[in-house]
Image (spheres, rainbow, N blue to C red):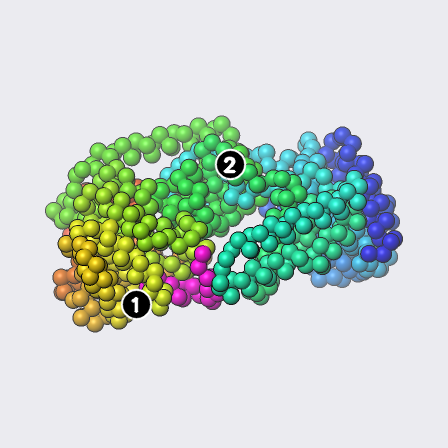
């Protein structure tokens, strides 16, 4: 870095630090900042635009433009050169602004007098907070060194904005993270809960963006990088993997940590006046901006490695975010997204979840649903806004989260919780009654489970057994492969807790979004249609064999029910069943007791199985429709992609007709069929399934009450007639017709 620039940037920061350190009103500080930048950089104009709301930028301070325009001039994201800088998160540097692409004339500012323009995004951890602009009359591009100095200043501005240094009265900025904010997302799990924000990735707060003494900061930075490297070396040497692919990934990671250019860039930032933390963040923001724009999967992965390393480094430097025990009372988990394994690790202490992304079909959602934890997904912007410990209300009934709610909202919300509690009491009163419709049809309602902790719900919900036991959850919660004896002990506890009721154990269903930390990751272009479930079980049968043995031992001479996930053709079922036969033979040879009644079933999750030969339907002991997967393949709509998932309704006549054809084939062969996807737990869907002939449904325990409550009030013949009418009408979905009819029934 040339000497002059270093001095310029440092000089600028030194003057800024003095100005920012003075106590004073936020607006006065902002005004001082633009004056200092304009005079130090000898530009006619310096302005700061900050986001007023998600997509409106507001001129908050200026030196050079008309003062009356401050807090009046607003731009939409992408509008004008300022909006373009914010949207692209890239520097816009032009000698001829009025003729540059996207220029927008704003008469109130008087900026038409200026020819050159340089806009630098003000960003913090990939979050764009505003734009810093300098302009001058002469037509020139700003030099690389000048742009660099502006970027360094923008970094400091971002930190100071985050810390609330520019907050003020009247038209000025209001403090970040203090106002009530409502987030409208989508419903993933109903229910309502009140609690405090628990951030999955705690926000690191940097209080000293400008270095007091660059030498001290350099030493802190180098020490922290060294600690990071040693930590990684330990981590990698502890991991005794023989897997060469995995080793390669680790090595790439270590290579980044040792990257000279990464450290060199951060050192240069410190030399130029930033503190060690601010330097790490500056580079991290750069990666994040590139990450969001890169279409190359390999590059994205490498950059996300760097992102992860930066987070570790920030935690080392600040000591923040390392205390995992710091969970608030009634924690409401707030995250961009979360995997099923991570959620299982947090456990049931979580009272609610709000995700910025997330999806209704993901396995994390299934876990939340199983635990009846209210879950709102697609709450855009919440991660940026929420602070650990903030009060928050999760309204899973409407897909809304209220962050830092005021008293009126809180009052209304508590009334809602009371109402939901009363509904639960109503369901409890029919717990021991059968799910029998008015026309006398008995529907078997079972529950889905996956953990020992789920089993007490068998009694509480009135479920008649477990229609789907997702065995993979036990594999996901561990950091190493469970052993056979462990599994067998666990399955026998499950059977004991079921007190003689049927439990349909589904063999390991991994792949897709269920990734085991201790198994080689598969870099597949489309994991949902990739090497998953029974495909893994048959290609690498070691785990399947161990699991089958563990199940037979757990049954200990009693009845046992096993089913295979994702069977797409008859042969796969035959091969899986052959593994059961082999396992039985081995056990017999060892003189161990065999199950008194062994039922071997298949999950129907791909349309192909609906067209399997008659021999399959004869051979299989029972079928369970995995509606979550079946629907995604039937409509070719990714269950985890919210945009396409919602286009297709489960109650679309085409899907119902397909289900009905499967029911007919099962009836013809006397094959019991049940439905265990999430839709089984939605009352209207459950009703329609019953009307088209499905007599057994398996769902999360909390759904049994509402589903039973509805079934007991209707005549299936009447429902059937409504469905037939809607289909004859050419309706896109029978939902509207059934729901309208229901209004008069219940
Ligand atoms: C399904 O696909 O409907 C199912 C029950 O299996 P999972 O959701 O675990 O994939
Ligand atoms: Mg499935």
Local secondary structure at mark 1 = loop
Q: Is residue 266 magenta?
A: no
Residue pictured at 46% horizontal, 55% vertical: 517
Residue 447 x %, y %: 26, 47
Instruction: State which mark lies toward you, 2 or 1.
Output: 2
The magenta span reads 518-534
The residue at which mark 2 appears reads as: 325
Residue pictured at 23% horizontal, 65% vertical: 582
Residue 265 appearing in the image? yes
Residue 568 numbered mark, or none: 1
> What main secondary structure does the magenta stretch of the protein show?
loop
Label 1 crowd (10 A; few <14 / some 14-19 / many >=20): many
Residue 615, placed above or below residue 309: below
Residue 329 x %, y %: 47, 31
Q: Nearer the viewer, residue 554 or 534?
A: 554
Local secondary structure at mark 2 = loop
Residue 127 numbered mark, or none: none
In which quadrant is the C terminus drawn? top left
Label 2, label 1: how many angstroms apart (C-alpha)? 45 Å
């Amino acid at each position: 870095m040339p000497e002059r620039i270093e001095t310029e940037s440092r000089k600028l920061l030194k003057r800024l630090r003095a100005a920012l350190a003075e106590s004073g009103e936020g607006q006065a500080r902002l005004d001082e900042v633009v004056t200092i930048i304009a005079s130090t950089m000898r530009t006619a104009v310096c302005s700061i635009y900050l986001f007023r709301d998600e997509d409106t930028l507001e001129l908050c301070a200026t030196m050079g433009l008309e003062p009356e325009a401050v807090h009046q001039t607003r731009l939409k994201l992408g509008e004008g050169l300022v909006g373009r800088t914010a949207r692209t998160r890239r520097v816009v540097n032009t000698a001829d602004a009025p003729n540059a692409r996207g220029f927008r004339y704003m008469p109130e500012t008087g900026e038409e007098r200026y020819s050159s323009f340089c806009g630098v995004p003000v960003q913090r951890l990939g979050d764009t907070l505003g734009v810093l602009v300098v302009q001058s009359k002469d037509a020139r591009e700003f030099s690389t060194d000048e742009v660099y100095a502006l970027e360094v200043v923008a970094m400091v501005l971002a930190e100071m904005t985050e810390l609330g240094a520019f907050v003020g009265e009247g038209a000025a900025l209001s403090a970040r993270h203090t106002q009530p904010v409502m987030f409208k997302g989508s419903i993933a799990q109903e229910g309502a809960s009140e609690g405090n924000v628990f951030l999955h990735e705690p926000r690191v707060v940097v209080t000293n963006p400008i270095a007091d003494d660059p030498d001290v900061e350099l030493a802190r930075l180098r020490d922290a990088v060294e600690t990071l490297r040693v930590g990684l070396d330990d981590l990698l040497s502890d991991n005794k993997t023989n897997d060469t692919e995995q080793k390669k990934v680790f090595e790439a990671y270590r290579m980044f940590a040792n990257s000279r250019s990464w450290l060199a860039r951060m050192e240069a930032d410190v030399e130029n006046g930033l503190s060690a933390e601010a330097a790490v963040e500056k580079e991290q923001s750069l990666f994040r901006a590139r990450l969001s724009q890169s279409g190359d999967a390999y590059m994205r992965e490498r950059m996300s490695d760097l992102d992860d390393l930066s987070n570790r480094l920030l935690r080392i430097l600040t000591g923040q975010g390392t205390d995992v025990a710091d969970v608030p009372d009634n924690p409401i988990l707030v995250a961009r997204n979360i995997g099923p394994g991570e959620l299982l690790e947090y456990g049931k202490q979580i009272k609610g979840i709000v995700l910025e992304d997330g999806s209704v079909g993901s396995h994390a959602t299934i876990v939340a649903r199983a635990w009846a934890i209210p879950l709102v997904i697609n709450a855009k912007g919440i991660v940026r806004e929420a602070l650990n410990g903030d009060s928050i209300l999760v309204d899973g009934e409407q897909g809304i989260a209220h962050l830092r709610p005021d008293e009126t909202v809180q009052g209304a919300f508590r009334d809602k919780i009371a109402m939901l509690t009363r509904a639960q009491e109503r369901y409890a009163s029919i717990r021991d009654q059968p799910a029998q419709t008015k026309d006398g049809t008995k529907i078997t309602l079972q529950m889905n489970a996956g953990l020992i902790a789920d089993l007490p719900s068998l009694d509480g919900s009135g479920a008649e057994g477990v229609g789907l036991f997702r065995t993979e959850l036990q594999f996901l919660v561990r950091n190493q492969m469970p052993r056979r004896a462990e599994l067998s002990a666990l399955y026998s506890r499950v059977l004991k807790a079921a007190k003689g009721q049927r439990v349909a154990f589904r063999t390991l269903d991994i792949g897709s979004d269920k990734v085991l930390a201790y198994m080689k990751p598969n870099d597949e272009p489309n994991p949902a249609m990739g090497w998953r479930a029974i495909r893994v079980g048959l290609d690498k049968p070691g785990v399947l064999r161990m699991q089958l043995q563990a199940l037979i031992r757990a049954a200990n001479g009693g009845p046992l029910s096993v089913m295979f996930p994702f069977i797409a053709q008859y042969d796969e079922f035959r091969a899986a069943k052959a593994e059961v036969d082999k396992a039985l033979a081995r056990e017999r040879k060892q003189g161990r007791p065999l199950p008194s009644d062994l039922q071997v079933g298949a999950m129907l999750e791909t349309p192909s199985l609906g067209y399997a030969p008659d021999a399959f339907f004869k051979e299989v002991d029972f079928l369970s429709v995995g509606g979550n997967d079946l629907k995604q393949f039937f409509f070719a709509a990714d269950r985890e992609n919210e945009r396409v998932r919602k286009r297709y309704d489960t109650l679309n006549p085409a899907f119902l007709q397909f289900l009905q054809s499967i029911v007919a084939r099962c009836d013809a062969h006397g094959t019991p069929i049940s439905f265990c996807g999430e839709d089984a737990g939605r009352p209207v869907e459950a009703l329609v399934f019953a009307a088209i002939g499905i007599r057994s449904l398996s769902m999360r325990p909390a759904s049994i009450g509402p589903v039973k409550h509805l079934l007991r009030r209707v005549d299936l013949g009447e429902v059937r007639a409504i469905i037939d009418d809607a289909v004859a009408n050419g309706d896109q979905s029978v939902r509207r017709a059934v729901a309208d009819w229901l209004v008069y029934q219940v």
